[in-house]
Image (tube, helix red, strand yellow):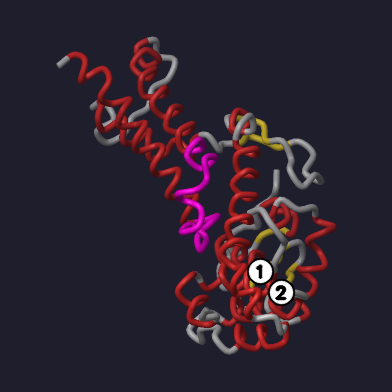
């Protein structure tokens, strides 16, 4: 996506793809998981996203598609 | 007639491939900044040109490859050269982003293995040029407003008060977090422009 990492970009990815692994989000943003993880944690603390196992998704996500792996 | 039949389909693939690629880029990566970029970025046109040339080349080569049975694609109307050119033009970018695997997934930019490897020769550099140009154009566009609206707290309030209520809660929440985190009026305005678009931005921050 280019530019500064934003919470909005992360929500946009989760809205588009549904439940995905954190490192898929990082790769879509062109960032490392180390850089992306704090943003995911803050979004989770704000009640905007939730984590289930390896997957992250928007709160109340109803799609049950399999988790997209980054490989 | 022969000339039209031999050059027509590649020309169609070139036009469709190039324009679809440009439209895709301007409506996704630069969705709210397209008005600043589309007339000013040479890299944008080179990017479209490259995909157009690849689509035209694939269209021109396909009959020979199909004749040798090296590549056979079947689909509705695919045997008609003009229709095939449309198919190839529309799908050129998607086909060039097929990856079978990636190397080193811990890296922020892992190298894809597959057709997409070819794209790595030109795409990252062109996208980087476009990002730099977009940033430059945004700074020029925002300059007068940054000079007029200097109070960070007020800028944040003006933006927060104008987030459309019709947006999904998750998008509103994430955007509010983005604005709260910014430390300069320019950063807030830039985020506002990218999120809400030109019309809303100019209403919120009139000159």
Q: Which quadrant of the figure contains the N terminus of chain B?
A: top left
Q: Residue at x 39, y 42 (%)?
A: B19
Please provide percent x and percent y for residue B189: 63, 73
**Label 1 sits on residue:** A57
Picture quadrant of residue B172: bottom right
Nearest to the observer: residue A12 or residue B202: B202
- Label ID, residue B190: none
Q: Residue at x 78, y 80 (%)?
A: A45
Disc 2 residue crowd, few under 14, some 14–19, many 20+, Cα 10 Å: many
Position of A16 with respect to A23 (left or right) is left
Measure the C-alpha gap from mark 1 to mark 2.
6 Å
Q: Residue furthest left?
A: B1
Instruction: Give the mark nearer the N terminus: 1 vs 2.
Output: 2
Q: Secondary structure at mark 1?
A: strand
Position of B164 with respect to B20 (left or right) is right
Picture quadrant of residue B20: top left
Q: Is B39 inside the magenta-drawn segment? A: yes
Q: Residue furthest right?
A: A34
**Label 2 sits on residue:** A50
Q: Residue furthest top?
A: B68
Given contact means CB atoms under 8 Å apart, are the residues at marks 1 and 2 in contact? yes
Q: Is residue B120 above or below residue B33?
A: above
User: Which of the chains bears the disc numbered 2?
Assistant: A
Q: Which residues are magenta?
A: B28-47
Disc 1 residue crowd, few under 14, some 14–19, many 20+, Cα 10 Å: many
Position of B50 with respect to A60 (left or right) is left
Q: Is residue A44 above or below residue B60?
A: below
Please provide percent x and percent y for residue B127: 61, 44
Q: Secondary structure at mark 2?
A: strand
User: Which of the chains bears the disc numbered 1?
Assistant: A
């Amino acid at each position: 996506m280019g530019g500064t990492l934003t919470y909005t970009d992360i929500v946009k990815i989760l809205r588009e793809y549904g439940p995905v692994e954190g490192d898929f989000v990082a790769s879509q943003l062109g960032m490392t998981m180390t850089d992306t993880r704090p943003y995911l944690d803050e979004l989770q603390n704000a009640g905007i996203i939730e984590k289930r196992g390896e997957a992250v998704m928007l709160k109340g996500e109803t799609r049950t598609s399999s988790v997209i792996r980054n490989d | 007639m022969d000339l039209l039949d031999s050059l027509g389909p590649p020309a169609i693939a070139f036009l469709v491939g190039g324009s679809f690629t440009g439209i895709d880029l301007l409506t996704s990566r630069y969705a709210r900044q397209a008005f600043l970029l589309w007339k000013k970025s040479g890299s944008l046109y080179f990017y479209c040109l490259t995909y157009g040339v690849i689509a035209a080349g694939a269209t021109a080569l396909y009959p020979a490859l199909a004749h040798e049975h090296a590549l056979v694609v079947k689909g509705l109307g695919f045997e008609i050269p003009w229709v095939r050119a449309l198919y190839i033009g529309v799908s050129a970018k998607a086909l060039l982003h097929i990856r079978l695997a990636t190397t080193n997934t811990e890296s922020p930019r892992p190298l894809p293995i597959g057709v997409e490897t070819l794209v790595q020769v030109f795409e990252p550099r062109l996208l980087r040029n476009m990002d730099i140009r977009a940033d430059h154009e945004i700074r020029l566009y925002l300059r007068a407003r940054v000079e007029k609206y200097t109070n960070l707290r007020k800028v944040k309030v003006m933006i927060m008060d104008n987030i459309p209520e019709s947006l999904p809660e998750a998008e509103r929440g994430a955007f509010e977090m983005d604005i709260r985190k910014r430390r300069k009026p320019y950063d807030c305005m830039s985020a506002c422009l990218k999120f809400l678009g030109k019309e809303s931005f100019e209403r919120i921050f009139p000159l």
